[in-house]
Amino acid sequence: MRKFKTESQRVLDIMINSIYTHKEIFLREIISNASDAIDKLYYKSLKENLGLAKEDFEIKITIDPSKRTLVISDNGIGMTTDELENNLGVIAKSGSLEFKKTIEKTDDLNIIGQFGVGFYSSFMVSDKVEVISKAYGQEDANLWTSKGTEGYDILKSERDTHGTTITLYLKEATENDTYDEFLTEYKMRELIKKYSDYIRYPIKMDVSEEVPIEGEKDKFETKIVTETLNSMVPIWKKRKADITAEEYNSFYKSSFFDYEDPIRVIHTSVEGATNFTALLFIPSKTPYNYYSKNYEKGLKLYANDVMIMEKSQDLLPDFFGFVKGLVDSDVTLNLSRETVQKDSQLKKICSSLEKKVKSELLDMLENDREKYEKFYKAFGLQLKYGIYEGWGVNKDTLVNLIMFVSTTTGKHVSLKEYVANMKEDQKFIYYASGSSADNVKSLPQAEKLLDLGYDILVFSDDVDEFSIKMIETFEGKEFKSISASGDLGIKDEETPTVTDDDKLLTDFIKKALDTKVSNVKISTRLKNHPVCLTEEGPVSIEMEKILNAMPAGSGNEQCNVSKSLEINASHPIFDKLKYLLKTDEETLTSYANVLYEQARLIAGLSVDSPASLAATVLTLLAK
Ligand code: ADP
C-alpha cells in the first residue's frame, strides 16, 4: 500500500466525511476529467497525424445495481503508471489548506475544481474507487485502487484500448443518505442534463427502451439500446436568444469553479480575418489568490472545436486578467501549444476582446451603477495598477473606468463625473490620501478647499497617486495633491498679506527647525488648524511613506521629500508665537518643535524623536 501525501489525505478526509448536500457533483467532475483526457488525445492526434476521428471518442456510463457499482469509462489519452501515481496520489495544484478554509466558508462544492481535487470527490459517495488506465501508445495498463482512508495500490492490469475506466463502489445507504439514486437510469439522465450537457463528446449509456415488436400490433418488448445523454452542443454555440441567464450562470459556476453568479456575461461573435466566438465572464468577487503570484489569468482556447489550451495567457491583457471564459476560433491548428502563443491571430483576438471588455465595463458604469460598484470593489485595484504599469501605456484604455471616493458625496465618482461637477472657478482636480472621506475632510490642508465647495478625491490605495501621476491631466484639468506646496488654486483675495513681522517669525522658526523642513511659510490653505506640512517636489509625503515601506534591499534608497511647514496666521497660536519672538526665544524654539511634530503626526508620519518631543512638551507644561 502506498500512502497518500498528507495534503491529499486531508482533502480525502473532508470528502469521506462530507455532509454536503451536493454530493452529486462528483459525476460532473469525473466526466469533465474524461472529456479533458479525450481533448488531449484528439489534439495530439491532429498535431501528429495519428488519424483518430472525433466520432471515435466517447464517454460511457454503466450502472450495476446488484454490485452497487457506477462505471465511467473514456477512450482518452489515459495515464501511465507514473501519471497514475502523480495525478491521483498527490494534490497537484494549490494547497489543501486553502481548499479546507474555503469549503468551510462557502459550503459549496462548486469550488472543488479550483483546487485540482475533483477526482477525490468520488469518495463522497464511494467506499472504494478503482481506476484502470492505459496510456495512449503504451502496452501496459494499470489498476489504481483506494478506499480513500490510508493509501492506494497500483497493480498491473489489462484494458483493451487506451483510456480510463473508473469504477465507484457506492456507499451503503444510511439513514441520512441514500446513494441508491446514483444507480438509476433516471438520476444519471438528470445529472448529465444538468451538469454535463455541454460536453462535446457523447456520454453514452445502455438504457432499456420499450420498442414495438415488428409485425405485432400494440405489442412492445424491452430492448437495451445505447443512448447519448448529452446534447453535445456547447452553450457558446447556441443562439444567444435561446440561452437563459440561469444557463449562463450555471455554466460559469461549474466551468470556472465559482460559487457566485458572474457579475457580467459577455457573449460575442466576431467575423473577420479570424472568426471567433467568445464567452466571457466577469466574476463578482476577487478570487482568493487574485493578487498573488499563484493566480493564473487566461482563457480557454478552442480551435475548430478542439480544446488546444486550458489557459491561454495571450488572449487577455494583464489588466483584464480577472476575466474568465473561453474563445472558440478558427485559428490554424498546425501550431504547437508553445508557438500558438506568438501567433498574430491571437493578438488580433486579444485586442478585439480588450475593446469589448472595456465597452461592457463602461456600459455597466453608466447604466448599472450598483453592479459596477460591486465590480470595482473586487477589481478596481487591478485597473489602477493597469494604469500605472508600463509607465502608463494603457492609461487611455483604463482612465474612464477608475473611480475614487469623493468628499462631497462620500461615494465613488469617476473622473468624468468629478470634472462635470467642478465649481466654475475650480482649477484643479484635488486629491488627498486617507482611509475615508471623513478622514480626508478632517485634514488641515482640506479646510479652505471644502469651504469653497471643492470636491476632493480620496486616495485610499497605495497605488492611487502613482497611477494619477501617469494620467497627469484629465479633460484638460491637472491633478493636485492638497498637500502640494505652491499654488493650490485658491483665489487671490484669500491669500493673506505677509508682513515684515511675520517674515521675522517664519525665518526664526525655519532656523529653529534647521534641516527638518526646507521652508516655513504663512499658509493660504488653513482655517482652523494651526499648522500643516506640504511637499515641495513632485513626490508627495504619501508616496514617501509608501516608497519607504517597501522592503529594504530592493534597490530603493530611503526617500526624504522636502517639506514645508505652513502656519495659519489667523490662528490664536500665531499671536502667541509673535509674542514669544519678542520675549522668549527659547520657548519659541520649543513651540516650533512641538508644532512641527504635530504636523508630522497629522500627515501620518512618525515623530522624529519621541523622547525629545516628550521632554519638550513636559518643559512647556511645567512653565
Ligand atoms: P484536476 O482535473 O483539476 O487536475 P483531478 O483531481 O480531478 O484534478 O484530477 C487529477 C488529474 O488526474 C488530472 O489533472 C488528470 O491529469 C488526471 N486524470 C483524472 N481523470 C483522468 C482520466 N479520465 N483520464 C486521464 N487522466 C485523468
Image (tube, rainbow, N blue to C red):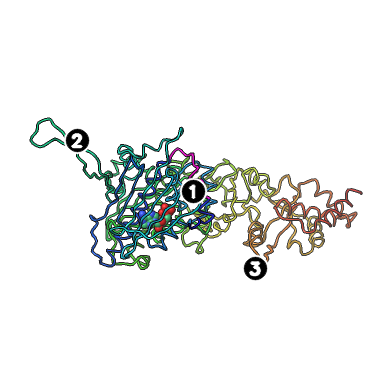
Dot 1 or dot 3, earlier in sequence: 1
> Are the residues at dot 2 and dot 3 in contact (C-beta closer than 8 Å)?
no
Q: CA distance from mark 1 to mark 3?
A: 40 Å
Give the x, y percent position of residue 592. 81, 55
Give the x, y percent position of residue 262. 43, 44
Return the mark for residue 82: none
Dot 2 or dot 3, earlier in sequence: 2
Left or right, 148 with reference to 333: right
Left or right, 127 with reference to 610: left
Tell me: residue 75, above or below residue 259: below
Q: Nearer the viewer, residue 514 or 434?
A: 434
Cβ of mark 1 under 8 A from ligand 1: no
Tag count:
3
Left or right, 550 with reference to 323: right
Q: Amino acid at mark 3?
A: Gly
Cβ of mark 3 under 8 A from ligand 1: no
Residue at numbered disc 1: 416
Q: Nearer the viewer, mark 1 or mark 3?
A: 3
Residue at numbered disc 3: 553
